[in-house]
Image (cartoon, helix red, strand yellow):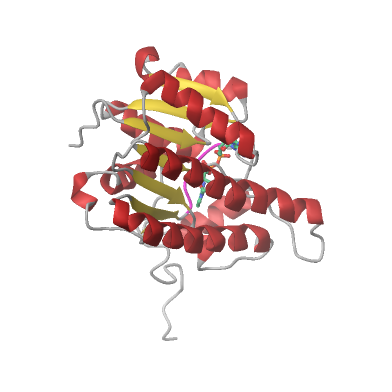
Amino acid sequence: MFDYTDKHVIITGGAAGIGFGIAKCFHDAGAKISIGDFRPDALDAALAQLSPERSYGYTVDVRDEKQIDTFFHSAEQEFGPVDIVVANAGVIPSVSVVNMTVEDWDRVMDTNARGTFLTCRAGARSMLANSNQGKIITIASIAADAARVDASHYCASKAAIVQFTKSLALEMAKHQINVNIIKPGYVEVESDVSPLSEEYKEVTRKGIPLGRPGQPEDIGNMALFLASDYAEHITGESFVVAGGASAGRANLPPAQP
Ligand SMILES: NC(=O)c1ccc[n+]([C@@H]2O[C@H](COP(=O)([O-])OP(=O)(O)OC[C@H]3O[C@@H](n4cnc5c(N)ncnc54)[C@H](O)[C@@H]3O)[C@@H](O)[C@H]2O)c1
């Protein structure tokens, strides 16, 4: 349905989970894929599932300005100027505000918010330098709007991503660079970095009207649309992919006795 042949897509946090799902969708649509992730073993395992001639991996911590810039430089040496950037790397820990350390707060804000800023900045600079139109996508969450307990740092980081992305979209509009946000609901991944409890997964599943958790390719499919010509007149917008979970409360009993 989508043809991304000869397009270069850079994805952070693409060694696993949603990021790999997005990478796979673009890869299967013909693109050249550069994945940045801070876990070299996971990166190797991810690359083993993609065509060697159209995939590149680089060990990078998105919190580090120099590492991100070097990653972009090295990916562009490999596959040429970037066409599409997906700022996906993120962590999802749980801790209440009263028990939260400054280190807990900083790790989440630095990975999710600062990492998104550094990734988008590198992408936008490259697109402007190469005068090529481009597409930038950030990954927020329905948690940007619907707060939940033990996730104040996470919810705050995702709300920050939304406003950051909208501002960037306004700045990039005159260059015809589209910048949009995907807000996933619960997506089923087996994360080594941010494991979720069985109880949390079970309760969350019951609140999804379409009756199943999201899969990484559900988010990848939205990314394929947003990076395509079909989305040419869309920028600065958020797109929820959550099986209806943000529409309301699907798991209430009948209100009448
Ligand atoms: N899974 C969900 O239900 C869900 C819902 C909403 C939003 N999200 C968002 O989707 C994104 C991906 O989450 P996921 O569920 O696939 O998690 P995941 O843990 O499966 O994957 C995240 C990837 O990011 C990498 N990563 C983490 N910190 C990094 C850093 N500092 N530098 C480089 N790489 C780093 C990890 O190594 C991992 O490969 C995150 O931004 C997350 O907040 C996930």
| Quadrant of the image containing the N terminus | top left
Q: Is residue 245 above or below residue 84?
A: below
Left or right, 22 with reference to 6: right
Q: Is residue 162 magenta?
A: no
Left or right, 30 with reference to 85: left
The image shows residue 10 at horizontal and vertical percentages of 43, 33
| Residue at (26, 46) in percent of width and height | 225
Q: Is residue 217 above or below residue 143?
A: above
Q: Name the residue nearer the viewer: 181 or 76.
A: 76
Q: Name the residue nearer the viewer: 184 or 77.
A: 77
| Residue at (29, 44) in percent of width and height | 227
Q: Name the residue nearer the viewer: 250 or 125.
A: 125
Report whether residue 88 is seen: no
Q: What segment carries the magenta color?
A: 186-190
The image shows residue 131 at horizontal and vertical percentages of 31, 40
| Quadrant of the image containing the C terminus | bottom left
Q: Is residue 248 above or below residue 140?
A: below
| Residue at (66, 49) in percent of width and height | 110
Report whether residue 43 is seen: yes
The image shows residue 58 at horizontal and vertical percentages of 54, 24
The image quadrant where one finds ligand 1 is top right
- Residue 147, quarter of picture: bottom right
Q: Is residue 170 above or below residue 73?
A: below
